[in-house]
Each structure stands twice: as structure tokens, then as C-alpha cells.
Amino acid sequence: MADSSNVIKALKDSQSTKYTSLVPNEKGLELAYSAGAKEIAIFGAASEAFSQKNINCSIDKSFENFSKVTKLAKQFNMAIRGYVSCVIACPYEGKISADVVASVSERMYDLGCYEISLGDTIGVATPDETRNLIRKVSSAIPIENLAVHFHDTYGQAIANIYASILEGIRVVDSSVAGLGGCPYAAGASGNVATEDVVYLLEGLGYSTGIDVPALVDTGRWISSQLERPYSSKAGQAIHAKSQK
């Protein structure tokens, strides 16, 4: 993350786009602020083992660190978003209790996070599990302050997003061409592809405001730059149709 500030400085300012900077500590926050970042993200876990592996501390210790970071962020008038990883299962602990997820999420909310994204980090969730989790967490936090973040390891991400929408979720994390992954989970694929999410949402009657052909072109371009297959199912179909 040493060159993150250079990335922030190179981004074009946009009234319709928010750029969020993941900050691990107070030093990272100060670097993000000096580079012009207006929003930060803190990244926690609902699994003790994953917290140790990913950020090298316990859940309680992570919140001690988050408290310092969020306090400084408020002084800088920066918005704060929270991420909770391993909300369904952990590669080390197995199944994770929804009660624990709700507790961790509520602690983030109390620190001042305007939104908490629930992450299925290793992509094992199924729709019923997803709905049950959201019901549990939304009993502690208003549903409008929750988002979902699904990886597509088992091909269930789109189904889980649909289940989330049925429960009232209106913010979905995704990545162009399904980029991403988890280095601690064997076989874990990337985040759900933005192209697939947009196709779902538009089909459900939601207006995303996204230029789909341009999105597909971008997904194909970044995949070629990274020398990896283009993984979006919707993107592949949309591109094939455009070639006829």
C-alpha cells in the first residue's frame, strides 16, 4: 500500500463517484487525508483466527485501533465505511455465528461507520444463509446502513445478492471483471463481477446509470492487462451479442 497516495492523487474528482481508501492505522489515515481522500474504510472480521491472520491482532485489539483511526477521521471530517469479513464462514474456524457478525457490525456502527459491508470472504454463502444473516444483523443496525460483499467461489454470488435485495439491501459491492480474491482461502475466486450485478439489477427494474457496453469493454481491457480470463458471464454474453 506504499504508493496508495499516488493513486488517490491521480484520480479525477467526480461529484457522482466516491473513492474510499482502506486505512490500517493512523499513519495510513494521515497519508490518505494528505492525498485528498474524503472517505476511509476500516476492515475487521467476525472470526478471531482470520483477524489474526489478516491484520495480526484479535477482534478486540482491532477495535482499539479502529477507535483511534475513526476519532482522527472525524476530526478531518472524513466519512467512514466499515467492512466485516468472514460473515458466513472462515477458512480456519468454519461456520461463523450470525450473533458474532451482528455484534462486530454494531461495534463498527457505534464507532461512526455510516455503512457496514458484510463480506462473504471465501464465497461459501447460500441464499437462505444470507437472508438469515441480514435479518439478524439488521435487528442491531438499520438496514439502510448495511451493504453486502460477495465472492463468487461457488457461483452463488448473484443468487445471494438477489436474496439480499429481497431483505431490503440496496448497496452491493462488486468489481469490474470479478477481480479480487482472498490469499488466505484456497480456491477463493474474486468478487462478484460488476457486469453481472448490473445485469441483475437492470433486469429487476433498477436504474444503475451505468453504461453497460463501456463497462464490458473496461472489464475485457483490464482482464487482458492482467493476463487473466474475462470471467463475467453477463459480460461475455453482451460482448458476443455485440459482435453479430
Image (tube, rainbow, N blue to C red):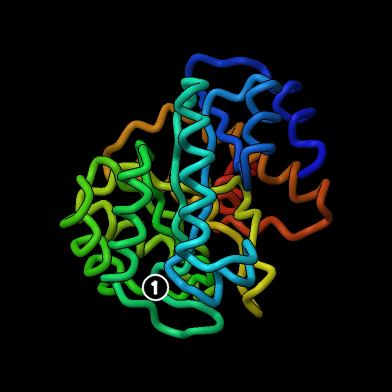
The local secondary structure at tag 1 comes to loop
**Residue 62 shows in this picture:** yes
Quadrant in which residue 31 is drawn: top right
The C terminus, quarter of image: top right
Query: Residue 188 appears at what percent x and percent y?
Result: 61, 72
Residue 204 vs residue 178: left or right? left
> Residue 191: x and y, percent?
56, 57
Residue behind mark 1: 88
| Front-lying residue, 28 or 92 | 28
Direction from residue 88 to residue 127 in the image, left or right: left
Q: Residue placed at 24% from the left, 41% from the top?
A: 144
- Taking 204 as reference, is 15 above or below it? above
Q: Residues within 10 Å of mark 1 (few under 14, many from 20)?
A: many
Of 14 and 41, the residue lying toward us: 41
Tell me what residue is drawn at x 70 percent, y 22 percent: 35
x and y, in percent, of residue 83 in the image: 46, 52
The answer to whether residue 203 is visible is: no
Q: Residue 140: horizontal and vertical position, in percent?
A: 20, 55
Q: What residue sits 45% from the left and 63% below the top?
A: 60
Considering only vertical position in the picture, is 19 above or below 116?
Answer: above
What's under tag 1, amino acid-wise? Answer: Ile
